[in-house]
Amino acid sequence: MSSRTTSLHTTRRAILLGLTLVLFGVFATAAAAQTTTLTVRVGVVPATDPGRFDLAIDGVALASGVGDGGGTVAQTVLPGTFTVSEVATTGTNLSSYSTTVTCLDGSEVLVAAAPLTATAVVVAAGHDVVCTFINTLLPVAPVVAPPVTAKPILLPPAFVRGTAILRGVEGCTARKVVTTRIIGRNISRIVFFRDGRIVKRVKAPSLSWRAYEMTTVVPAGDHQLHTVLVRAYFVDGATPRVKAMVHRFAHCRSSEVVS
C-alpha cells in the first residue's frame, strides 16, 4: 500500500473520530440540559425551636432529624408526579405546630402554602423544583394553678371572634415599595414572613380594630415572584386562634401590563 493511500485512511479515521466526539458532546450537553431535580427543605418558626423532622420523597426518607434550614440534597428524578412529606422525629410532636408546604419551580409557584404535611407535586423535564415545609410552633396554653380559696362560679365569657383581613398588591406591580397591611381586632400578635423567612414580629394585644404593616422594597431590576405570608394570632378565648394570609407580587417587566 502506498504512503498516499495510508495517509488517506489515516485522515478519514481522524475525521470520523472528530465527528464522533462532537456528536458525543452534543448528546452529553442535551442530557445535562434535561437534568430534572427535586429538593425538600424544612423551616421552623422560631428558628431556635428544637423540633426535628424527617423528609421524604414518595415515602423514602432522604433527610433525617433536620431542623430549621435543613433539607435533602437535590435529587435527580425522571419527570412526573411525586409526593413530598415530612414526619416528626422522636421527641417532636407535629400537633404542636401549624404546618404549610410551598413548592417552587424557579419563580413559578406549584404549591402555594398548603396546610399539609404531605403533598403531590408535578416535576417537568429539565426543571428544578424545591418544596419547603414551614412548621410554626403553636402557642402553649398557660397552666393555671388551682385556687387556694373558694371562689364563686363564674359564667363563661361571651363568644369572641378574631378578625384579620390582608390588604396588599397581588401579581405584577410597578411599585418600588409594596405594603402588606393587616386590619383586624382581638389580635394578640402578628408575624410577617417574606419568601419563607420571618422579617417582622408585632406583639401588641388589641381588642379594638387596628392596622399592622410591613413594607417590601422591590428594586427595579428584581422581577422575582415574592411571597408574603402573614400569621395573625388572636387573644386567648378568641375563635379562630390563628389565621394565615398570603399575597404574591413581582416587579413588572417592560413587556408586562403595569398594575
Image: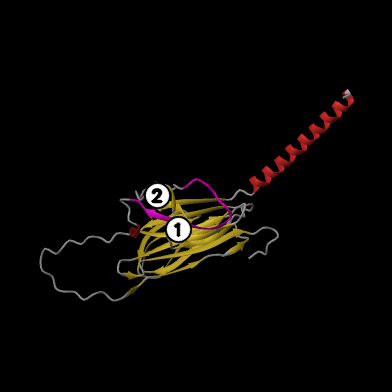
Which dot marks residue 47? 2
User: Quarter-wise, where is residue 94 in the image?
Assistant: bottom left
Q: Give residue 144's mark.
A: none
Q: Nearer the viewer, residue 215 or 5?
A: 5
The residue that label 1 is drawn on is 192
Disc 1 versus disc 2: distance between alpha carbons? 14 Å
> Is residue 178 visible from the viewing direction of this image?
no
The image quarter containing residue 25 is: top right
The kind of residue on which mark 1 rests is Phe
Q: Residue furthest top?
A: 3
In the image: residue 46, left or right of residue 151: right
* The residue stretch that appears in magenta: 72-89
Which residue does the image show at 88% across and 27% down from the upper left? 5
Q: Is residue 103 above or below residue 70?
A: below
**Which residue is pictured at 33% across the width and 58% down the height?**
96
Residue 56 at x, y percent in the picture: 44, 52
